Image (cartoon, rainbow, N blue to C red):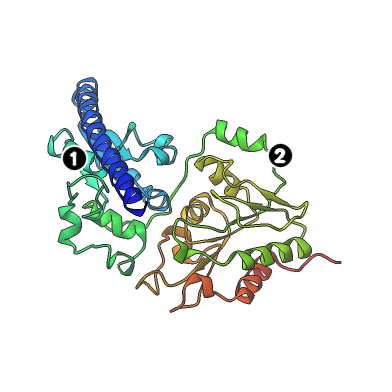
Amino acid sequence: MASWSKQRALWIHRYNKYTHIVGKFRSFVWKYIYLRWLKYKAGNRPLVAIILSEQMGDIIACEPVVREVRQRHPDAYLIWLVRKQYVELVKYHPDLDNYLVEKCPSERVYLLRTGIFDTVYNMHISHRKCKYCPEDPINPTADQIDLTFDNYYNRGDLLYMFSQAAGLPALTADPKMYIPEKVRQRVSSLNISEAPIVIHCQSSHVMRDWPPENWNRLVRWLLDTYPYPVIEVGLESVITEKHPGFRNLCGQLSLLETAEVIRQSHLFIGIDSGPAHMANATGATSILLLGQLFDFVDYLPYSGRYKRGEDITILNNFGHPCSELPYGWVQEAAAQRLGQPKLV
């Protein structure tokens, strides 16, 4: 039975692999034709690519790159290559002319080899491969400054690092998010209480997370102590506390809707994650919980306001993972941000 299960898993992997590879080449051909048509339609305007296809926090943090590139190429047709799940983050940027959905890093390799783009600003570090494809994406500019996955968090915040990987000066600007009115109206229809405390408890990597029991304890204390409602955002909820002042919106919001809820918050409390970058880019006051991540001990991925220490309390028990951050530190930081508790 075990042997059959292994054989079945192997054939499923092979089917997924070759289906992906065939789909990649079809997608590449279609995109190349589409880009040729764009160049024809753009006339004398150069076709300029900005490449940072993932992750959510990286894309939000590197928004100032668009403004920098637009200043350098005021007449260019500016297009951002991005994965499908992150399109919202670039779709409404006023300095972009378009975006192109990237199927996988290997497809990007083939597109760049065609020379279809007149200028390319590639923010990716080398060797972030597709799990199915043999091609190894290389960024010579990142290699030239010795920027690797082993040292990138020791070199500065995300914008500072990735702007240099793209061949730009080390940028330090405040990131922005562009939330259209239709998204604000959708959030308004949710009838969210004014100025809530918004929390985000679970990231894409367990090493960034704080224990669920601590989150539940914190939410219970916040609701018992202050008049503000508490809203949880993200993909999956960790809060089990039952209270009329708590609202779970996990898995119910788009990326920009999540950003709008955070923008409206009285206080955002979260771990190092995409929503924390949203808080930085939307002007929210925040408490962020950090800890050792692999070999990175003293790191700060945020530029702009949070790097300057404005409207932010960063908690980091250096040398320990976020899971070991003392509960009392977070409660004390919240009390300092929220002020005098309500009278009982």
Of residues 263 and 319, the one nearer the viewer is 319
Front position in the image: 254 or 171? 254
Towards the viewer: 58 or 10:
10
Q: Residues within 10 Å of mark 1 (few under 14, many from 20)?
A: some
**Above or below for 188 versus 168:** above
Amino acid, disc 1: Thr
Q: Which residue is mark 2?
A: 191
How would you rate the neighbour count of disc 2 (Cα within 10 Å): few for under 14, some for 14-19, many for 20 or more?
few
Q: Judge whether residue 52 can be spotted in this image.
A: no
Mark 1 lies on a secondary structure that is: strand
Which amino acid, mark 2?
Asn
- Helix, strand or loop under label 2: loop
List x then y, in percent, for residue 133: 21, 44
The image quadrant that residue 221 belongs to is: bottom right
Q: Earlier in the sequence, mark 1 or mark 2?
A: 1
Quadrant position of residue 191: top right
Tell me if residue 337 comes above or below residue 40 in the rendering. Answer: below
Pointer 1 residue: 119
Q: Is residue 46 left or right of residue 251?
A: left
The vertical placement of 209 against 45, above or below, is: below
Residue 220 at what x, y percent from top left? 73, 63
